[in-house]
Image: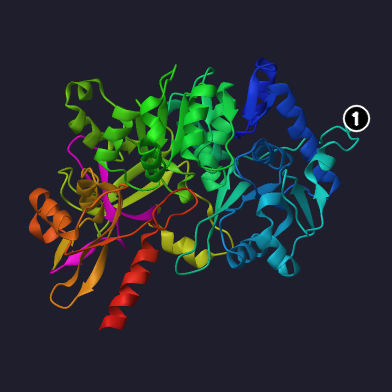
Amino acid sequence: MLAPLTPLDWKRRAIKYYPEKIAIVDGDKSFTYKEFGHRVDQLSKGLLEKGIKEGDHVAVMLPNTHYMLECFYGICQIGAVMVPLNYRLSAKDLNYIINHSDAKLLIVDEAFTEPIEEIQNSLSLEEMIIVEVDGESTSLQGTLYEALIHHDNDKVELPIVEIDENQLMTINYTSGTTSNPKGVMLTHRSNYINAANFLYHINVSHDDRYLHTLPMFHANGWGGVWAITAAGGTHVCLRKVDPPLILDIFEEQQITMLCGAPTVVNMLVNEPKAKQLNLQSKLRMATAGSPPAAALIQKAQDILGLEMVHVYGLTETSPFILYCEWKQDFNEKSSDEQATIKARQGIELAFNGETTVIRPDGEEVLWNGEELGEIVTRGNVVMQGYYKDVEKTDAAMKDGWFHTGDLAVIHSDGFIEIRDRAKDLIISGGENISSTEVEGVLYKHPDVLEVAVIAIPDEKWGEVPLAIIVPQPHSALTEEEVITYCRENLAHFKSPKKVEFVEELPKTATGKLQKFRLRELYWERAKRVN
């Protein structure tokens, strides 16, 4: 008899073979796999008592704690659908998502209840479960999480739910920019295949100690919530990204793995404590979310000794569809050349299916590292569609392919390299300028901490590049110096025509740069000037 592909089966395996192994470390708390499994089953029983049944939707708004890990298993193993929420969203967006997702119940961390308090009367929820947090309080009425799972139901047997691998497992909402957030429907199968790729390509092992720096709500922690359990590794939880604390945890917990956006890498390499680290084990880090600059990868390798693994994907693809495969002959190249290669998105992963770059006519671009096209993919990890949105689903899925909206080239060895998002490409005087290429050059400047390059309107050229820079502390960097530096390292037409210095750049909860907010700000400013 065939067994369905579901990442839930890895919990069973971990409890069977590693019952006394520490599964989770969360601050001063820790749980073995046997204890973790018991808490998960107790959560499932509590949800059943609350009337949640197979096919029902449960929203969860929690940081990276053991409670969040328990929800991924406890909700889904009874056949219910988990809706992870970004706790940094506005009350308006949360109101839309909770109602649009048809969530019957919300599990919420007490520290993040303020926006829910604001909208509670407009939510279609039947009940709320509240995770208590020391020093926090809320006016929300609901059942306390610990009371729910410690209810006297030890003798109650969990019903056997026959999971179909193609049934819905999670609905993950993308951030809305110009419209409402979209609910990405991911199945047990797509989550399983993605987590298998995580296991294989990031080399997860039984002895790994994985630090959850990446928000678990973001594409289900890229699959790490399941992959670490599959190997019987240890999950180390982290409520928020705090660079000094992260570096302390590296040492104290002997961390071997983590994931995060390039902005998180940047925060870590620029933390003063980074140069005093005394690590006992080699650290591996997968990075994705936006194209990382080669200079940033080199800093991570030089300062932190990080073995960087560049992956690429989208929420709509569970999320991994490319990774930068490292080949033995790359080790003979200079460190600068190695970093340049690691900045590429790479090739298909072993299990996800087919990914390529196509022209507008649907034909694959030449493998010459020059011809620009759109990344498209099909196979085992692509979403079922957008929840209750056939029109947007049809727009994204064309001719059997999911269209990513990312513009890229294919190098002669098959490695794909993103040059820009379609909406981020700068077209100046008829010439295409990759904002990420300009950013990559600027990240090599010692006085640049962070940078974003966007198009701004120009009377002569239509639009020109603007560099928005967060300088290093105590830097005296000037606009003239930046433009001169770029002209020395780029074609003149690609160099920024203007430079602005800011204290910070807008980012998502996962550290991904929000260029659309910068474009809105600077284009509106340009309209007022004109």
452 is higher (above) or lower (below) than 528 = above
SS label for mark 1: loop
Decide whether residue 232 is among the magenta residues: no
Decide whether residue 414 is among the magenta residues: yes
User: What crowding class fits label 1: few (fewer than 14 Cα within 10 Å), some (14-19), or many (20 or more)?
Assistant: few
Tally of numbered tags: 1
Nearest the camera: 183 or 68?
68
Residue 218, given in percent of the width and then of the height, sits at 52, 47
340 is higher (above) or lower (below) than 230 = below
Q: Residue at x 43, y 38 (%)?
A: 352
Q: Quadrant of residue 351?
A: top left
Say what amino acid the circle numbered 1 marks.
Answer: Lys
Q: Residue at x 37, y 54 (%)?
A: 404
The residue labelled by disc 1 is 155
What stretch of residues is rendered in magenta? 402-429
| Residue 409 left/right relative to 509 | left
| Residue 489 left/right relative to 279 | left
Nearest the camera: 372 or 400?
372
Quadrant occupied by the C terminus: bottom left
Main secondary structure found in the magenta portion:
strand
Q: Residue at x 16, y 67 (%)?
A: 428
Can residue 1 be seen in the rendering of this structure?
A: no
| Residue 207 left/right relative to 124 | left
Residue 161, given in percent of the width and then of the height, sits at 75, 38
Nearest the camera: 216 or 360?
216
Quadrant occupied by the N terminus: top right
Q: Residue at x 20, y 21 (%)?
A: 329
Residue 435, given in percent of the width and then of the height, sits at 24, 56
392 is higher (above) or lower (below) than 413 = below
